[in-house]
Amino acid sequence: MFVPIAAGNQPWGTVEVYFKPVVSPGIWGWLEDPLIRLVAYMGCVGSIGYYLFLKRVLRQLDPSKVVPTRVRSALDALTEGLLILDDKQRIVLANEAFTRHIGRTSDALMGQYIEDLPWRNKDDMTARKLDSSPWREAYQDKQAKLGVLIDLQVSDDIRRTFVVNSAPVFNDKNRCQGVLTSLEDVTPLEQKKKELHYALEQLRETSDAIRHQNLELERLATTDPLTECLNRRSFFNQFEANWKQCNRHEHPLACLMVDIDFFKSINDTHGHAMGDEVLKGVAASLRQTVRLGDLVCRFGGEEFAVLLPHTNIDEAAVTGERLRVAIAALQFPSLSITASIGVSSKSLGANDAQAMLDQADKCLYVAKRNGRNQVVRFDNVPEDLIVDESKISRTKPTENAAKKTSEKEDSIPYRAVNALLGALACRHYPTAAHCRRVADLCVIAAESVMSMRECYLLEMAALLHDIGKVGIPDSILLKRGQLSIVEWEMMRQHEAIGAEILSASFANDTLQAIVENRQAFFAGNPQKPHLPTAENIPMGARILAVADAFDSMTHDSVYRSARSDTEAFEELRKCAGSQFDPQVVERFIQAVSARRRSSDDSLELRVSRDVACDIGSQIERLVNAIDKQDVDLLKALAARLKSTASQHGIDQITNQAAALEASVSDSSDAVDVLESAYELIELCRSTQRGYLSNMTLQSSK
């Protein structure tokens, strides 16, 4: 639009007015139309929604329409779970085994991302998801991932463990289109593995307790229960070891024999309870006065032996005087005591450990004969001194005995005797225990009538008097019922077998004479007329015969029940004069009766100690066999423990050992075997604890 402008009558200018079109020309004007915009907006939004809807629908398609029925049936027949995943790690097929494992239906799993399932790292109890998964790695690396252990939290209280194997699936163009994953449920196996690990840990913890108990039992087995000093046989064992070591390195070695003066008067006047207190006090004084490494042994009733390694005769004499002063300083209610001490040294001509003890014992005799309460050393004793034991309440040796002890015979190493006794214990533990008890009884009865060497020989003979039973068949030796006549004849052969063993092991006529003549009757044995009679029977054999008969009568056997001590004493007296030496019988009864009055030194307690120690050593070996997974050794140890418990009437251990033996023989589950072994070990430990508790109770009394 143009509007002219005039100045007067003349044209001056023009005003031009321009209007923009409401709608742009062309396509842009069409797009600016609101209706067109509305249609375009609705089309875009509808397309996106339709795409998402179709995507959801396609995820829920039933794979059975694609997978043939026969193929799906074959996959469902598999016992292990099977999943087929697409390239997005979505489940497109799950067989029935997997759905049973996790408690979900196949329809619920279709189209679900496998990562959405509550997978957990093995043994990780938190809610944290997997750090990496085998199916993802198989897809990414285009390689199979095998044997991966993964947990699946099925519910709050159920967790399953699977061994997962994943392999990529390729198309014709070698392009990875998905993953085939198999899942083997090993939850029961893992549970057994955990139980096995727990059981092994329990056994390892138990083994420490067993070793501690065995150490305590070993201490009790090697010590005198009243005085807590070494007992005789433990002392012999360590004495021989020290003797050999000193010979090898040419070190000095000395020993002392300590005897409480007039001890019998203490028992008679003040009672055996006071006598026990005196023994405890003297023993404590000896242990506190000697050096660390010196050995203190209760050698007899009131006699103690002290071994001093790396000590010459002069130093030993000084130690003896120090001990004498310490004992004299002891104070007891209404009495004081003294002691006589004999001292000897390896340098004074002793050929073996027993000879050195004999020298110290000879010095002890001199000290008593010269007024007591003094120390006598062997180099101050006249060589021609004749020890008259009868002057100090010991009988004078017979000419035959004196002649035999003067003859040179080979010494009897205690370790060799102990080894033979151990072999007997493996064959038949009750017989070995019987031999130990008989040896204890012989020592008690012979302390006042024999010299130290004679007493030692008698003790060794008693330990070995039934050694021939190692050659008796198990069918006879382990028979629980009565023996037939033929079996008795075979059983009697053990005497000849024992004689052969002793002859081959020790060149000692005195030892063999004691063992061979223990069957001799004082008035003559009609069945064995070749054996000596009366005083011609060696004294050791007479004592052994009485001790053997007494122990047999006071303990149960397959053919008779145990008698009381009183009944056994009466039977010994009935047979005195015919079968047994009357004087030996009376002396034996007096000595044993006096010792039995002290409950702390009860021989029955020693039997229990032997049983507890034997069971303790066996269960320690049992734990080691389990730890090493030695099935054959475990079976053998279970059988031996069953035999030991059966012989001693411990029915619970017998039954449990039989159950363990059966479970090992049947190749049962490892956890079941361990549980059976653990129950057996606990039963054995309770036996040990019972014995230790009784010992503690008696010590407190």
Image (cartoon, rainbow, N blue to C red):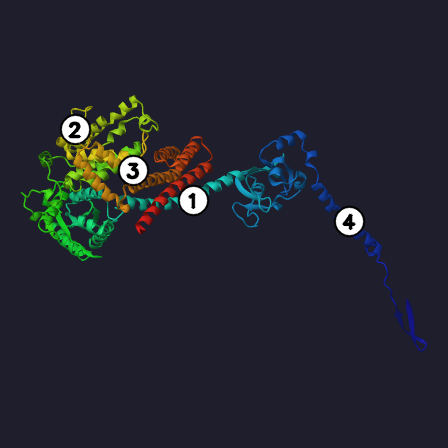
Q: For the residue marked with disc 3, what is the amino acid?
A: Ser
Label 4 sits on residue? 46
The nearer-to-camera label among 1 and 2 is 2
Q: CA distance from mark 3 to mark 4?
A: 109 Å
Mark 1 and mark 3 residues within 8 Å of each other at the beta carbon: no
Mark 2 = which residue? 523
Q: CA distance from mark 2 to mark 3?
A: 27 Å
Q: CA distance from mark 1 to mark 2?
A: 63 Å
Q: CA distance from mark 1 to mark 4?
A: 68 Å
Between discs 2 and 3, the one toward the N terminus: 2
Residue 336 rendering spot, x and y as whole percentages: 18, 56
Three-letter amino acid code at the position of disc 4? Gly
Between disc 3 and disc 4, whose residue precedes? 4
Q: Amino acid at mark 2?
A: Ala
Labels 1 and 2: the sequence-earlier one: 1
Disc on res. 202:
1
Residue 478, given in percent of the width and then of the height, sits at: 33, 29
Q: Is residue 185 left or right of residue 461?
A: right
Mark found first going from the N terminus, 1 or 4: 4
